[in-house]
Amino acid sequence: MTLNYQFPKNFWWGSAASATQTEGSNNGVKGKDIWDHWYATEPNRFFENVGPDTTSDFYNRYQEDIKNMKSIGHNTFRMSISWARLIPGGVGKVNDDAVIFYNNVINELIANDIEPFVNLFHFDMPLELQDQGGWENRDVVEAYVNYANEAFRLFGDRVKTWFTFNEPIVPVEGGYLYDFHYPNVVDARKAIQVGYHTMIAHAKAVQAYHQTQDGKIGIVLNLTPSYPRSQNPADLKASHICDLFFNRSFLDPAVKGEYPADLISLLEEYGHLPHTEEGDKELLKENTVDLLGVNYYQPRRVQAKAHLPNPYGPFMPDWFFDNYEMPGRKMNPYRGWEIYEKGIYDIMINLKENYGNIESFISENGMGVQNEERFLKDGRIEDDYRIEFIKEHLKWLHKSITEGCNVKGYHLWTFMDNWSWSNAYKNRYGFFSVNLATQERTAKKSASWFADVSKQNGFND
Ligand code: BG6
């Protein structure tokens, strides 16, 4: 029997999570990262004052969680390694306790026929390295490459799909532009340098991987298609610049090995080019990714600024465009983000037409919901809105595949409700809910729906 939405054979069905958000910073031996530090110094910056020590305890319960993943048909799962856990302090000796833990998790996944996808950096800079300037400081690039090499050496015999960074633009936006991550700096010049050093670190890790290992390595980018308010030239230009800053500043160097010429000339015009070193250009050019993870949550809608550029105040990307609230746009009423399912198709078509049809997959997509307990019925969360959300996105993803896009899978954010940076437990995304007092996991309705989809490799509608 063929289904209306039948996905290609061996499609990757799964979900994603990250170390800091699930393991519990007080579990096992771990160095401090910026989240431990920021929470210790400014707990009131976190929703309901809840920090990274209050998690879903994956560190102790991974066996149960992996069993649950298997029960809902996962064949792949993306996790991250905590740099500060593997190498406390960021440089120096590997922590044996962490090696045992990550080996156990990886082996358990494989024993359950779930292929581990491993990401190296998910917003969690070791504190000692942040104290030396974090990504502002080029020396940190070498520390990162050393960490990456240790991870490849320790786990590369079993892990064949790696990612260097998750959403590298987020620490730039959060830490250096809009004050929602530590170190809470607002300085576009530093932001640009931080973004640049991240991509140098990325390219060096790709190079090291290809020199020593035999799997695939990529990067996970949050792509937010930029839609102009109208087709008039000013709106089109605003949307183009927004796309340069928020998508192509990472997408182009990762996949094409070079920054967009328009972005370089814009930064040059405003005197904001980053410091580079000899050989950087070649490094980027020669070390492009094997595959791309795409995180898609919402689009950006953009219009021209009334006065362009704003001559007052320090340089910011926002000089060049305004956000636009399109009347009638569909919203997630429980999180506040726009829902635009076709965005997933537009991204994939763009990758096909302009990025050599690079192998890709949806590495995160999901629906955050506040106070989700309100949908509790007979002990289970009846999240029909999430089923609808996933289904509508999958339909567009399916269409992109039928049109030749090189899409290999779909991962939900996230497997079970987890702690999320300064939003802590405000927005719930999981297939499983977690009672933080008892650590009991309960499958939501979407979990059994997704189990059917992954087991049949598609669905009817
Ligand atoms: C993604 C991140 O961008 O958004 C995750 O990769 C994060 O780490 C997720 O948890 C949801 O964010 P929020 O703010 O809605 O909880």
Image (cartoon, rainbow, N blue to C red):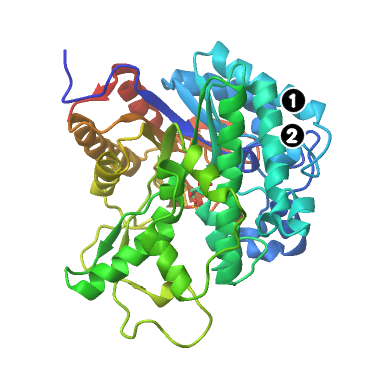
Q: Residue furthest right?
A: 93
In which quadrant of the rendered view does residue 206 lie?
A: top right
In the image, residue 323 sits, relative to residue 103, either above or below, namely below
Across and down, in percent, residue 11 comes to 34, 22
Labelled pair 1, 2 in contact (Cβ < 8 Å): yes
Residue at position x 72%, y 25% in the image: 101
Left or right position of 21 against 456: right
State the SS at label 2.
helix
Residue at position x 45%, y 48% in the image: 253
Q: Nearer the viewer, residue 287 or 84?
A: 287
State the SS at label 1.
helix
Residue at position x 39%, y 82% in the image: 309
Across and down, in percent, residue 251 comes to 42, 48
Q: Which mark is residue 99?
A: 1
Can residue 325 be spotted in the picture? no
Q: Which mark is residue 86?
A: 2
Q: Residue furthest front?
A: 278
Can residue 106 be spotted in the picture? yes
In the image, residue 25 sits, relative to residue 149, either above or below, namely below
Mark 1 vs mark 2, CA separation in Å: 7 Å
Please rate how many residues cluster around mark 2, counting C-alpha atoms within 10 Å: few if below 14, some from 14 to 19, many from 20. Answer: many
Circle 2: residue type: Leu
In which quadrant of the rendered view does residue 236 lie?
A: bottom left
Q: Is mark 2 within 8 Å of ligand 1?
A: no
Left or right position of 8 against 180: left
Across and down, in percent, residue 380 comes to 44, 34
Residue at position x 73%, y 60% in the image: 133
Q: The N terminus is located in which quarter?
A: top left
How many badges with numbers are in the image? 2
Across and down, in percent, residue 65 comes to 57, 25
